[in-house]
Amino acid sequence: MQNRSAVALLIAVLSFWPFPAEAQKNKELAGKCLTCHKQVSPGLYQQWYESSHAVHQVTCIDCHGADKRDIDAFSHNGAQIAVLVTPKDCGVCHAKERDQVGGSHHARAGQILESEDAYLAHVTAGHPVAITGCEACHGANVRIDKNSPNKLSPLSWPNSGIGRINPDGSLGACNACHPRHLFSRAQARQPQSCSKCHLGPDHPQKEVYEESKHGNSYATAIETMNLHSDRWVVGQDYYAAPTCATCHMSATAEQPVTHDVGTRLSYSLRPAISKRQDNWQQKRQAMKQVCSACHRSGFIDGHYAQFDATVALYDEKFAKPATELMTLIRKRQLLEKPASFANDIEWTYWEIWHHEGRRARHGVSMMGPDYTWWHGLYEVAQHFYFKFLPQAMELQDPEVDAWIDRLLAEPEHRWMEEQTEVLRKQIRDGKVQAIYRDLFPQKP
Amino acid sequence: MLQRYLNFLRGISVNWLGKIGVILVTSSFIAFLTMEMLRLTGAITNDYIGLITYMLFPALFVFGLLLIPFAWMRYRRQRGKSTRELLDETFSTEDLRSHMFGSRLVLNIGALTLLNVIFMLAVSARTLHFMDSAHFCGTACHRVMNPEWTTYQRSPHARVACVECHVGEGVKALIDSKLNGLRQMVLAATNTYNRPIPTPVHQLRPSRETCEKCHWPDHFYGERLLRQTHYAPDRHSTASHTSLLLRIESYAADGKAGIHWHISDRHAVRYAAADARRESIAWTEVVHPDGSTTRYQNTALDPSMAATATEVRTMDCVDCHNRATHIYEEPGSAVDRRLVAGELPLELPFIKREGLAAIRPFYPDTLAARQRIDAHLRGFYRRLGEPVQAELVDKAVVVLQSTYTRNVHPQMQLDWNTYPSLIGHRTENSGCFRCHQPAMQGTKGDTLAHDCFMCHRLVAWDESDPYRYFSPAPDSARDRALHDYLHRQLVQP
């Protein structure tokens, strides 16, 4: 019995023992890769040289080395390599990060795009922009081209979209935030890193942040932010301002760093009508804990009260009625053309929620007043009253007209039929405000 | 005797034209002799004077001689008399009396003509000899040749005359070169030559006849150390070194030969270029001793371009050493070289960066270049607001100005890198990499070798220590994998 265990142990040890010849070969290859690439891609080499990877003797072959059986592997000056480095490759050393990213909303960005077929881009614009626009952020479903020298098709390479669907089955691209080959932690901590995708008319998180006090303070005090530090705990290693990473990912005195960006988000503000996340109270608590590195609870709770009320205002006054009306119009088959987005009113509805409504909600979530109102709810209201409803009325359907009449009789929409002076007086008296009382937390 | 000669002169000076002829002939003859005497005795050493001695005086001499009969014909037409009557008027009867070998006048003319012919033969020989001198080539067409003359004088071939490489031997070569020279003279006189002058790659003489007179293939063996120093554009112009052991053998066992394998006479390396400057190669092949060939095709070249590559050329020296003599520097390495030599003072802060910035632009003319280089450097050190030694700045200005005027020639539209060198590999597809690149594919799908160690081993690569890889890597080195690899390449047999 004992003998058998000893033999088993010996076999186990031997099977994991690195073959000296193999190790020597890799060492030789590593030197060869570096020598050639110092010449042919000096910028890339220099970035690697400055990276932590170089300090720890992690070289080209450690990440790009591939198994001959890999679908994207090819022979390159005596080495089997792959150009594509996936979260699975990075995860050999960074296992915790791989698992956190793999479970995050980021990792599913490519699948989300696939499930929606990138419909709008494909039908209204065309395939090239689906690649260079949509997939560049969301991540491509990587195509293999056997005839391409690097085995990758130019239809999906280069691509560092955050939810890239890789040939090895893994999801994501670590270099979406940690660009090769410096893999700088400072870069990932800066708002510019997230701003590759989180900006523009449909989700202006970058612009909102820049408008906010947080962004202002950051821009003023970048050099005090200790961005290159190994440890980066808010309130301890830096204090001037939070960046995107601070609130959504980084370590606090009580929480560890996480690569799942959704763990502190209580809402999904992406869809037409806002949704609470699963376990939202717990997630909100985690975010409040980040806030508490600088703010006391009165400030934090006040912010959330304003935030919740504005989100609810958008949802209840505009998003839900607009969505209900669109559903009614579609149910009654009132649209002239059959294809989605082939009719005016569909674009109007889309922009109300996908652009303007998100701007309002993202604006209020990060305290960007201009995005909350002028770029946000102001545009939602204008387009709802003077574009969306008139386009619905043009359909000349009695049921739709009746529905609109009912809506406009609601207290929050009735203002159109009042005299201005009366309304002004009602504002001064607090009667108009009273309509929205229920949106704020009720005192017990 | 002298009296008789003077009488003769007086006799042929029938009008002002004849007088000018006589004066020109006599004075240029005497002047030539004087100048030649002065040169022979060493009183004149300036080569430039040869333009006057061997070009101007002989031309005036011939011109004067031609004037004399012309003057005589004009004189006869004006007077409306016969030759005999005029001769009677001008010369004494004694001179005109017939003897066995003709009259004394005829003998005089005969003797003087013989003297002239002998003199002109001697002068022509001297003139041809002078035209073979580098000074003639370099300075006769001053404006056109100045760039080539400037670079030649500072080249490793400064003591090899132009004609040794550009004319070659034999009567045909001589006549060809003189005819070509005549064409160029017309172009220069009518101001219709190209600026810059295109490199005459197609008219060059075969290097087997020229270069190999001194550098024959057996000359190349072993390894040669090439050490380059690069200065960074920082405050201290920090130096870094790249040292290569270049394998330059022509002959060695299979697979062991070095760069000059290409010109070994055991085989021929041939290629066809798709452009006139031979920078874009369509295909290349080795012709083995048994006549068989191994060919590689440039798969990256546009097929319509490749189709234009019809001229097949056998590789020789100038396919790589295209700038062996007329060496134009690159601005960055020109500054580096003067820093290594100590001509530019390293004590000046930012001297690499500012020196390069001063000489990099293309100025409208040489005078403007001198002024603006001066203004740039002095301006920078004034603005820097730190005390720097004025004499060091003075020195740097002078060196940078001469660096510029050596390499850039605005009057010929010749900027930095107008004539790139093909030695080594400066960019992805230049020099050696014209052929040795992954796109050059053989018939079996193999690629023309482009391995670093085929041509050189690395002793240092952008390192502070020029011999760094002779020692093994320290444990703390970030580039330990690279260092150890290159170290093994150096120490393994």
Image: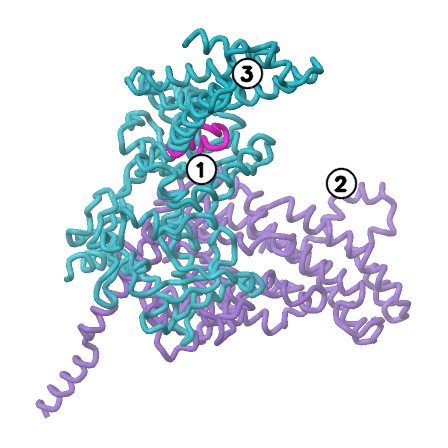
Colour chosen for chain A: purple
Name the foreground residue: A299 vs B492: B492
In the picture shown, does residue A415 fall above or below B127? below
State the extent of the magenta-drawn residues as a range.
Answer: B131-147
Q: Is residue B354 visible?
A: no
Residue B142, percent across and down? 47, 28
Front tag of 2 and 1: 1
Q: How many labels does the image show?
A: 3
Residue A395, percent across and down? 88, 67
Q: In what quadrant of the picture does the N terminus of chain B appear? A: top left
Mark 2 nearby-residue class (10 Å; few <14, some 14–19, many ≥20): few
Q: In what quadrant of the picture does the C terminus of chain B appear? A: bottom left
Task: Tell me which chain appears cyan.
Answer: B
Question: Mark 1: which amino acid?
Answer: Ala
Q: Are marks 1 and 3 in contact (CB under 8 Å)?
A: no
Q: Distance between the residues labelled 2 and 1?
A: 42 Å
Residue B295, percent across and down? 41, 70
Q: Closer to the N terminus: mark 2 or mark 1?
A: 1
Badge 1 is on which residue? A221
Q: How far apart are marks 3 and 2 (CA)?
A: 119 Å
Q: Tag on residue A428?
A: 2
Name the foreground residue: B320 vs A39: B320
Question: Mark 3: which amino acid?
Answer: Gly
Q: Tag on residue B21?
A: 3
Name the foreground residue: B329 vs B267: B267
**Chain for numbered disc 3:** B
* Magenta span: chief secondary structure: helix
Q: Tag on residue A316?
A: none
